[in-house]
Amino acid sequence: MTPSKTASDTLVHDPEGGMPRLLEIMRRLRDPKTGCPWDIEQDFASIAPYTIEEAYEVADAIERGDWDELEGELGDLLLQTVYHAQIGAEAGHFDFDSVVRAIADKMVARHPHVFADESRDKSAEQQTRDWEAQKARERGAAGVLDGVAQGLPALMRAVKLQKRAARVGFDWPDASHVLAKITEEAAELTEAADSLGPDRTEDEFGDLLFVMANLALHLKVDPEAALRRTNAKFIRRFSAVEAALADRGKTPADSSLEEMDALWDAAKAAEAPA
């Protein structure tokens, strides 16, 4: 039953209203007669980019160790789930309660060593294998690579695709073979860039990135985290270059590459452990 406006207002303005409060706020925002015009116009597709963005902002706050900001970003991400659930309820597909029920059922089914009689006396690695085996049973007759979301960032998707293939034995036996393949792909990229045109160059560049993603799996490195770390390092060092140039009354635009390279090396040396 839809609450009366008075009851709804009471809940919306109750700081202790918890999850029911957030659900009611979203219901009110989407009300076709009295809601927010922008919120009313949204659908799954238009909201999806915001969902992805909020997930990355959560990861960024964790990376920076900013726990106050993380609290807010987690709220923003939760709002995305509520938003999709409200749209789903309006279309008759699902609602927030069914979303919660489905994930709770999944967690119970995938953790028999916690919620059933299976022994907990096994390594985290074995538990991961059991988790993946359970997911495979849930997929049934689907192909090995089915269900890897197309909307993932390409590097993350490459890792997931290769993880799936590796589970059925389709992978190099160790990192040395991957490194040899990287050398091969780098040579093919050089040839393509020199003489084979832009389409072939893009193709070979993609091949090299794909093999680099496989190397990350063998080295047990998260390539997304590694690249975020390098991005942060680049920003930090380039900012030091800009600051040093500013002390000289200059900007990067009116400085030579040689001058900036020297300042870059100085910034890098300043970060080196004693």
Image: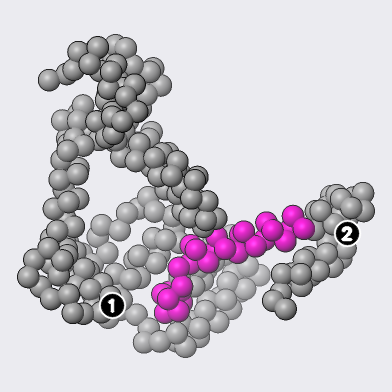
Residue 74 horizontal/vertical position (percent): 40, 44
Above or below, 86 against 244 in this view is above
Residue 256's tag is 2
The amino acid type, in three-letter code, at marker 1 is: Glu
- Can residue 101 be seen by looking at this rendering? yes
Q: Residue furthest right?
A: 248
117 left or right of 261? left
Residue 79 at x, y = what percent?
35, 36
Residue 201 position (above or below residue 150): below
Q: Nearer the viewer, residue 267 or 3?
A: 3
Query: Is residue 203 among the parts visible in the rendering?
Result: no
Work out whether mark 2 precedes mark 1 in sequence or the reverse, and give the earlier one.
1
Which residue does the image show at 45% across and 85% down from the upper left?
A: 175
Choose between 244 and 166: the one closer to the eye. 244
Q: x, y percentage for residue 87?
A: 26, 30
**SS majority, magenta:** helix
User: Which color scheme did the rendering employ for the protein?
Assistant: one colour
Q: Is residue 132 left or right of residue 109?
A: right
Q: Amino acid at mark 2?
A: Ser
Question: What residue is disc 1 on?
Answer: 125
Is residue 196 found inside the magenta-colored segment of the image? no
Q: Which residues are magenta?
A: 214-240
Residue drawn at x 22%, y 33% as measured from the top left:
88
